[in-house]
Amino acid sequence: MYSLLRFVVVLASVALPSAGSSALNVEESNWDTLIGKGKSAFIEFWAPWCDHCERLNPIFDELADTFSDVKDKLVIAKVNVDVEGSRALIERYGVTGLPTMKYINERGNTEEYDPQGPRSLEDLAAYLSRKSGLKSRLPPPPPPPPVLTKKLTAETFDNIVMNPDKDVLVAFTAPYSAHSQTLQPIYDRVSWDFRNEKQIIIAQLEVDGDPRRIIGTEYNITSYPIIKLFPKGSNMKAPNDFLSTRDELSFVEFLNEHTGTQRAVGGGLFDTAGRIFDMDELVKEFMVASQADTLKIYEKAIAQTITQSVSGKQYLRVMEKLIRDNKGDYLVQEGKRLGVILEKRALSDDKLDEIKIKSNILASFVQYLDSSSTFEAPIEATKPVKEEL
């Protein structure tokens, strides 16, 4: 959240949604007319210079849309703190950072939405439904995935967390902590997202009871939840603190950054997964090369993949197929085939990861396939790499 260090005076807004916005714009002059009156309200305090606010604003507008059927009972509105006259509202509601969201019930009682809480449309809508008793127009959420979070005890903590071959994310929670309860379903989804990453463990320790409380003291756990990543590489791990907002996307980004994975929310792989920069450079040469130079580049690729992973071998398979067959037909047809497999999702998670990586590598060739390509297969045959699905 941004600290309120500055205010810029601009033209006062009117109590109407701005262009493309469904949430009302309110300020001191029209606050008492719009807020209260027996209605509940959910207010976002924001500023144009706040990056986090800019990301939240479109979600907040969608939130207003989802509750439009009950707008006679619930007001969803924004306060631009840079508008003249907003300072009184900021002081009245104790706003010290941006963005800040406040729920005001029909009796005027105020509660701040957890600044570290999730900010997805679904999470905000669920929060509002719980507080107001009103239903949104969002479809019911899908059933939660299986819970894969590893539950730790005082006896298992060191063996699991200090395993030098594993990156271990640990949530220190308490059963009496409301924030821990809010975190639980989000954290369980993260464990599902990383189910295919065998070197990563998503774990949880409820710091309740003397032995576990000693562990909490050792890691300076004074509030709940606290999340720390214990990186692999040593059995004397110095943990990295997770300090971002506690939503699924932030956890996924944190783990990708610190462990080198390329996971997306939901557990799929990014379009860059499996891609190798040096091999992509050779693909660029290969796809625009003359017939005489194609095999030379292929030989360079063979030398390059000696120290590469399985992904490097997949680059070779595609090159070999292109040398033997018509380039355009193969790339188009193989791309369609892999796309159908990924869309149907009928294979195991591990196999779908393999298919996604193959699709990503194929895309590195497809990007150079256009009307200007003059590729022709050379007459010489190549020694094929063993084909796989």
Image (spheres, grey):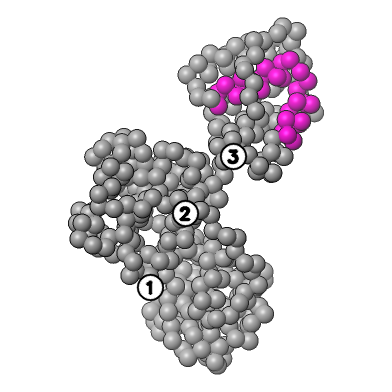
Report the disc number at residue 96.
1
* Image: 226 above or below 358: below
Secondary structure state at the residue bearing disc 2:
loop
Q: Toward which corner of the image does residue 171 lie, by quadrant? A: bottom left
Three-letter amino acid code of the residue under disc 2: Val
Q: Toward which corner of the image does residue 286 lie, by quadrant? A: top right
Residue 160 visible, this orientation: yes
* Image: 36 above or below 231: below
Tell me if 216 is positioned left or right of 192 in this view.
left
Residue 176 locus on image (x, y percent):
33, 70
Three-letter amino acid code of the residue under disc 1: Thr
> Which residue in the structure is indicated by mark 3?
348
Segment colored magenta = 311-337
Secondary structure state at the residue bearing disc 1:
loop
Residue depicted at x 79% and y 26%:
329
> Which residue in the structure is indicated by mark 2?
147
Tell me if 217 is positioned left or right of 199 in this view.
left
Dot 3 or dot 1: first in sequence order is 1
The outermost residue toward the bottom is 37
Residue depicted at x 38% and y 73%:
96
Q: Toward which corner of the image does residue 204 lie, by quadrant? A: bottom left
Residue depicted at x 50% and y 69%:
47
Q: Nearer the viewer, mark 3 or mark 1?
A: 3
Looking at the figure, which quarter contains the C terminus?
top right
* Image: 282 above or below 28: above
User: Do tag 3 and tag 2 residues touch (Cβ < 8 Å)?
Assistant: no
- Is 318 inside the magenta-drawn segment? yes
Q: Nearer the viewer, residue 180 or 61?
A: 180
